[in-house]
Amino acid sequence: MKKVRIGVLASGRGSNLQAIIDNIEKGRLSAELAVVISDQADAFALERARKHGIPAVPAGAKGFKDKREEYDALLVKELQKRSVDIVCLAGFMRIITPVLIKAFPNRILNIHPSLLPAFPGLHVQKKALDCGVKFSGCTVHFVDEGMDTGPIIIQAVAPVLDNDTEDSLSERILKQEHKIYSRAIQLYAEGRLRIEGRRVFVTEGRTTADEFLINP
Ligand code: GRF
């Protein structure tokens, strides 16, 4: 089976990227990382890529302030040059435009640290704590033209505890992120995802519910 070639876009520390790298190296994910691109030249994500021999491309966004489409065209060129099959956004802090989305229709994935559609956008953990939810979690979804709105592939749940701060909740959720991003990519690689409207069906996915989560 041909391995899915992934292009990762990241702006920061890249812990999700690292989880993908580790899963590939351990043989748990049959994919290859074709390139890691960052809008921040000093992003630790680039450092992580270099350490594992993955092409790391700084793509500074200075000079593209009101030219989002032009910036995205540059990303598309770079991704296509590397024959990328899918694009994984992993802490990429820019809003992407239809230029990128149309170049990779239903082939861009994003990870978000909440159970979407709850709490899209920024300051996600603060919103979850302020709202008083007992569970939060994370979501991997296909990217469409809205903000964190695309069809949901996979979610993981994390409890919100009474002594939680934004940091402690983020940390608990991040552990789940590191599991589900690779799983979503693996399902994609195996050709098991089918999008119908807003729903993503998984071939031979779960069809019984015998576990329930209760908190507290
Ligand atoms: C993660 O919480 C992810 O859900 C969000 O940005 C953060 C990126 O973290 N989109 P990292 O750079 O992968 O460590």
Image: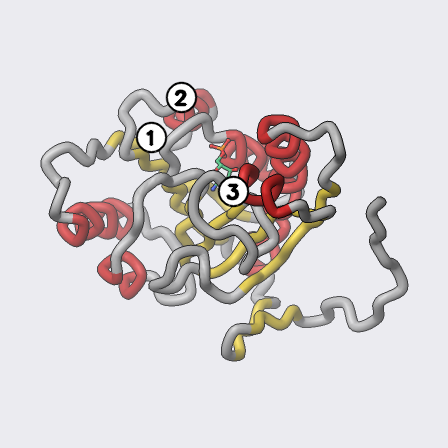
- Spatial CA span between label 3 and label 1: 28 Å
> On the image, which quarter does residue 172 sit in?
top right
User: How many C-alpha atoms fall within 10 Å of the one at disc 3: few (<14), some, or many (≥20)?
Assistant: some
64 sits to left or right of 103: left
Q: Which residue is mark 3?
A: 124
Query: The disc labelled 1 sits on which kind of residue?
Result: Ala
Foreground pick, 210 / 73: 210
Q: Secondary structure at mark 2?
A: helix
Foreground pick, 71 / 168: 168
Q: Ligand 1 near label 3 (Cβ, under 8 Å)?
A: yes
CB-based contact (under 8 Å), mark 3 and mark 2: no
Name the residue located 45 percent from the left edge and 26 percent from the top edge: 13
Mark nearer the N terminus (3 vs 1): 1
Q: How is the image coloured?
A: secondary structure
- Spatial CA span between label 2 and label 1: 8 Å
The nearer-to-camera label among 3 and 1 is: 3
Name the residue located 37 percent from the left edge and 26 percent from the top edge: 46
Mark nearer the N terminus (3 vs 2): 2
Query: The disc labelled 3 sits on which kind of residue?
Result: Val
Q: Secondary structure at mark 3?
A: helix
Q: Which residue is mark 1?
A: 56
Could you say where residue 7 lies in the image, as x and y percent from the top left? 39, 45
Could you say where residue 119 lies in the image, as x and y percent from the top left? 52, 51
Query: The disc labelled 2 sits on which kind of residue?
Result: Glu
- Spatial CA span between label 3 and label 2: 26 Å
* Total count of labels: 3
Could you say where residue 196 lies in the image, as x and y percent from the top left? 53, 79
